[in-house]
C-alpha cells in the first residue's frame, strides 16, 4: 500500500534523494539470477554515514541475503548500530517494505526506523518499522528468572 508523505515524515529529510540514488546503485549490483528481483538498500546512521547493501541469492535458497540485512551487516561491521532512515529501491511494480526477517533484524537496532521504498520508476511509499512490526521479538523477551 502506498502511503502519502506525512508532515515530519522522511519526505522532509534532505538525505532521502542521496539514499535513493545509493540504493538504486546497490540494486544494479544485486545478484538475483533465481528470482530476478533485484533490491538495493541504503541505511543512514545518525552521523550521516550511509551503508548500502543488495540482495545476494544462492542456489541453496536459504543461504541468500536481502539488501536490508546486507546494509545492516555492513553498518555493524563499520561500528554503527544506530540508524535513522532506511531507503529501499526495487524493480517491483509497487514499492515494497522489508520482508519479515529484515524487519526483525532491523528492530534490534532501530525500533522506530523510518523506511522509504521506491520503484525504479519513482513510485514511493513510506512506513515506520514500528508500524510494519507492531509486536517485535526484542531482547526484553529473553528475560527470565532461573529457579
Image (spheres, rainbow, N blue to C red):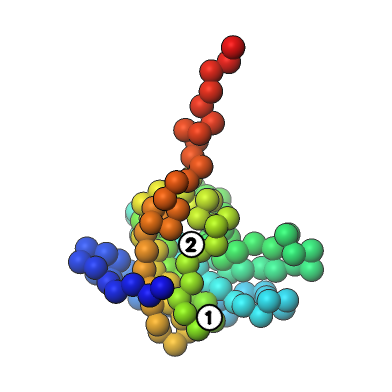
> Percent from the top left, x then y, of residue 25?
51, 78
Q: Nearer the viewer, mark 2 or mark 1?
A: 1
> Percent from the top left, x then y, of residue 2?
38, 75
Q: Can residue 74 be seen in this view?
A: no
Q: In which quarter of the image is the N terminus?
A: bottom left
**Helix, strand or loop status at disc 1:** loop
The residue to which callout 2 is attached is 51
Foreground residue among 120 and 97: 97
Q: Cα distance, mark 2 to mark 1? A: 22 Å
> Percent from the top left, x then y, of residue 49?
41, 59
Foreground residue among 51 and 90: 90
For the view shown, which residue lies furthest in the top direction?
A: 147
Say whether marks 2 and 1 touch (CB < 8 Å): no
Residue 99 appears left or right of 58: left
> Percent from the top left, x then y, of residue 40?
53, 72
* Mark 2 nearby-residue class (10 Å; few <14, some 14–19, many ≥20): many
Foreground residue among 92 and 63: 92
Indicate the quadrant where residue 44 lies: bottom left
Residue 95 appears left or right of 29: left
Indicate the quadrant where residue 65 lies: bottom right
The residue to which callout 1 is attached is 92
Amino acid at each position: 500500500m502506498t502511503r502519502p508523505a506525512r508532515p515530519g515524515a522522511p519526505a522532509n529529510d534532505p538525505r532521502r534523494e542521496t539514499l535513493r540514488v545509493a540504493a538504486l546503485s546497490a540494486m544494479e549490483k544485486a545478484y538475483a539470477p533465481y528470482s530476478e528481483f533485484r533490491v538495493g538498500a541504503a541505511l543512514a546512521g545518525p552521523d550521516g554515514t550511509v551503508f548500502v547493501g543488495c540482495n545476494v541469492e544462492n542456489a541453496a535458497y536459504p543461504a541468500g541475503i536481502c539488501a536490508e540485512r546486507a546494509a545492516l551487516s555492513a553498518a555493524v561491521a563499520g561500528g554503527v548500530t544506530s540508524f535513522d532512515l532506511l531507503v529501499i529501491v526495487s524493480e517491483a511494480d509497487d514499492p515494497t517494505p522489508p520482508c519479515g526477517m529484515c524487519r526483525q533484524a532491523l528492530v534490534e537496532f532501530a525500533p522506530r526506523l523510518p523506511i522509504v521504498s521506491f520503484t525504479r520508476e519513482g513510485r514511493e511509499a513510506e512506513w515506520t518499522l514500528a508500524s510494519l512490526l507492531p509486536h517485535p521479538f526484542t531482547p526484553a523477551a529473553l528475560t527470565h528468572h532461573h529457579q
